[in-house]
Image: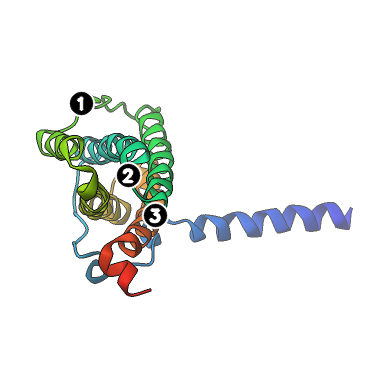
């Protein structure tokens, strides 16, 4: 009897600790100064979804190109990781669009004009310039995505979307750090 009660109490104690450990507002370890952008405050749920989806779709398309066109194996490996993480993020985002309290319309899978132009530049890039162009573009989109997700994680009003945002922040921070280490200046500092 004591073992059952102790186990039940332990499970009650560990649940709140876990919930606090993944609280979206405290996700990630980088500051605005580290990333180079400020979190975007006061986004509506639909605007957050549109912006986050556009960043995910860009990362998916760009990483698919980089996985085959990159010249360096470390860049190809990085692109494959970014591809898997962006696909996972997009899947989670789409799954969170419908719940009992509200439904947010799924965004188009078409890229915004700015992001579509970036993909076209990658498609036309000469082999010798592809890796650095991909890493540079990817970092810019990751910075923007960090601002979107970090902002919504901090002050978003939809708990499901806030959880998606909070989960995305540390993934983006890791991608930014890894991507930066693969650039010419990052490689020179090794």
Q: Earlier in the sequence, mark 1 or mark 2?
A: 2
Cα distance in 3D space between marks 3 and 1: 28 Å
Residue that numbered label 3 is attached to:
24
Cα distance in 3D space between marks 1 and 2: 24 Å
Residue 159 visible in the displayed image: yes
**Nearer the observer, 171 or 67:** 67
**Residue in view at x 12 percent, y 36 percent:** 117
**Residue in view at x 72 percent, y 58 percent:** 10
Q: In the rendered image of this protein, does residue 80 appear above or below residue 30?
A: above
The chosen color scheme is rainbow
In-image side of 59 versus 78 (left or right): left
Residue that numbered label 1 is attached to:
110
* Residue 76 screen position, x and y as percent: 39, 46
- Residue 70 shows which numbered tag? 2
In-image side of 114 versus 172 (left or right): left
Q: Are marks 1 and 2 in contact (CB under 8 Å)?
A: no
Instruction: Give the crowd class for mark 1: few <14, some 14-19, many >=20 residues within 10 Å.
Output: few
**Nearer the observer, 110 or 182:** 182
What quarter of the picture does the C terminus occupy?
bottom left
**Nearer the observer, 31 or 60:** 60
Q: Secondary structure at mark 2?
A: loop
Q: In the rendered image of this protein, does residue 95 appear above or below residue 176?
A: above
Q: Earlier in the sequence, mark 3 or mark 1?
A: 3
Q: Secondary structure at mark 1?
A: loop
Between disc 3 and disc 1, the foreground one is: 1
Q: Earlier in the sequence, mark 3 or mark 2?
A: 3
Residue 31 visible in the displayed image: no
**Residue in view at x 22 percent, y 58 percent:** 39
Between disc 3 and disc 2, the foreground one is: 2
* Residue 90 screen position, x and y as percent: 36, 35
Q: Secondary structure at mark 3?
A: helix
């Amino acid at each position: 009897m004591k073992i059952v009660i102790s186990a039940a109490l332990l499970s009650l104690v560990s649940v709140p600790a876990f919930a606090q450990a993944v609280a979206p507002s405290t996700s990630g370890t980088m500051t605005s100064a580290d990333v180079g952008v400020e979190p975007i405050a006061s986004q509506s749920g639909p605007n957050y979804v549109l912006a986050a989806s556009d960043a995910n779709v860009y990362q998916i398309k760009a990483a698919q190109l980089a996985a085959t066109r990159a010249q360096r194996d470390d860049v190809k490996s990085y692109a494959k990781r970014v591809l898997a993480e962006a696909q996972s993020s997009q899947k989670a985002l789409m799954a969170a669009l419908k719940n009992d309290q509200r439904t947010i319309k799924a965004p188009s899978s078409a890229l915004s004009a700015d992001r579509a132009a970036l993909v076209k530049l990658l498609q036309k890039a000469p082999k010798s310039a592809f890796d650095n162009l991909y890493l540079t573009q990817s970092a810019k989109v990751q910075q923007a995505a960090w601002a979107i997700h970090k902002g919504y994680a901090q002050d978003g009003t939809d708990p499901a979307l806030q959880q998606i945002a909070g989960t995305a922040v540390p993934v983006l921070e890791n991608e930014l750090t890894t991507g930066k280490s693969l650039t010419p200046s990052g490689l020179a500092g090794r």
